[in-house]
Image (spheres, rainbow, N blue to C red):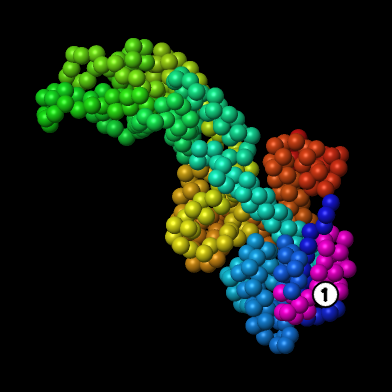
Amino acid sequence: MKKQKLLIIDDDEDLRTQMKWALTGDYDIYLAEDRPSAIALINKEQPAVITLDLGLPPNPAGVEEGFAVLDHILDEYGHTKVIIITGRSEKEHALRAVGKGAYDFFYKPIELDELKVVLKRAFHVSQLEQEQRDLRQRLSGDTFEGMIGTSSKMQDVFSAIRKVATTDAPVLIRGESGTGKELVARAIHRLSIRASRPFIPINCSAIPENLIESEFFGHEKGTFTGAHVQRKGRFEMAEGGTLFLDEIGDLPLTIQVKLLRFLQEKTIERVGGREQIEVDTRILAATNRDLEEAMRKAAFRDDLFYRISVINISLPPLRERNADIVLLAKTFLDRYANESKKKIKGFSSQVIEALERYAWPGNVRELENRIKRAVIMSEGKKITLEDLEMQSVAGVKENILLKDAREHLEKELILKAIARNENNLTKAASDLGISRPTLYDLMQKLGIPK
């Protein structure tokens, strides 16, 4: 495998040499001792990771030269991971550098075993981000009807949408709140022969029970107080197009009966009317409820269930779409940063880890809302855990033993490689640069089920 590029910027020749010999087996090492040589190498080689001592000639006692190099990197190569090498007495400078966008900082004197762990983590995050950028590039302008998903489960959903869109069969879209059920319904409509006709969504749980029948089927003039004119309902408004019944599990039984009659006869009757009105409308429905359980409790009609669920499409929760989380997050970040006209260049490394570790109970909707809020609240060039209000989703504690940190990192790398390769262990082993038997041994050691 081709080695990744590491640039070491330090005015101490002995330290540069020590780091080069210690790390040359893992990386292609480049050395620079001052700002001109550093910028020349950065522009030519564009390394993924850089270690930077802020004290550089001609004023090694100050930090101006180091910060000038950092500013150049962040302005021109914002995806590069910069690790600040500093003395403990200069912690405020290191924190200032991280605030500007540096990836991390490391104290002198250098403990090479610890530095290797930090570097490995930085290169891994850089590789993940590059993969996500490549995916976004391939998907740009070619997302599936406004939906993004590279995971196998979402590809199955896209395949199902393509198949059902060409029919007029009722479809039941199932999934937790926030998974994007209405997006699926709109995609089915846009890909159907009804695309030029109306798409009418109704949230069945948001309409008061005493108004549902009138909302659905309309009413005749004088039917009730306030009915000054005849009014068409949503079914008629969707003539020739698609009617999307969101949260259909919340429909009262009386309306379920009338909906069933429409599905059987394709006619409706306005409230207060006697005329049977033919309506050509396709029904798509969605729910986050367990309709089988509702049927057992007699809260949902069996015959209606079988009518609306000729075809079922199940949307996976975001926690089962690990390969999509960072891709979605960066898509939302680009969207809201552009809307807000903010020059935000990405996420801090801690955010990337937290995004992948968090369970996302609110699914894609929660992710989008968190990113939107973070863009509004952010004052830096990168989104932080504080911006996302995800401080509690912490990574590895800084005071744990080196052995435990290594095992944690190994486990994290293996799990992500397995997820990236959709549980194909041969490909995961290849990604990690190890043999399949070695991967098996590591999985057994770290308690990772096969």
For image coordinates 57% across by 62% down, the residue present is 345
For image coordinates 48% across by 20% down, the residue present is 167
Image position, residue 66 (x, y; %): 68, 78
For image coordinates 71% across by 69% down, the residue present is 43
Above or below 325: residue 449: above
* Residue nearest the viewer, comparing 112 with 218: 218
- Residue 22 lies in the magenta stretch: yes
Above or below 373: residue 215: above
Above or below 6: residue 147: above
Q: Is residue 276 left or right of residue 82?
A: left
Q: How many marks?
A: 1
For image coordinates 58% across by 59% down, the residue present is 346
* Residue nearest the viewer, comparing 174 with 3: 3
Observer able to see residue 198: yes
Image position, residue 260 (x, y; %): 35, 15
Image position, residue 36 (x, y; %): 73, 79
> Which residue matches tag 1?
16
* Residue nearest the viewer, comparing 225 with 413: 225
Observer able to see residue 297: no
How busy is the neighbourhood of tag 1: few (under 14 within 10 Å), some, or many (20 plus)? some
Image position, residue 214 (x, y; %): 23, 26
* Residue nearest the viewer, comparing 62 with 42: 42
Location of residue 213 by image quarter: top left
Q: Quick one: quadrant of the C terminus?
A: top right
- Residue 160 lies in the magenta stretch: no
Which region of the structure is painted magenta?
A: 17-39
For numbered disc 1, what is the local secondary structure? helix
Q: Is residue 303 left or right of residue 442?
A: left
Q: Amino acid at mark 1?
A: Arg
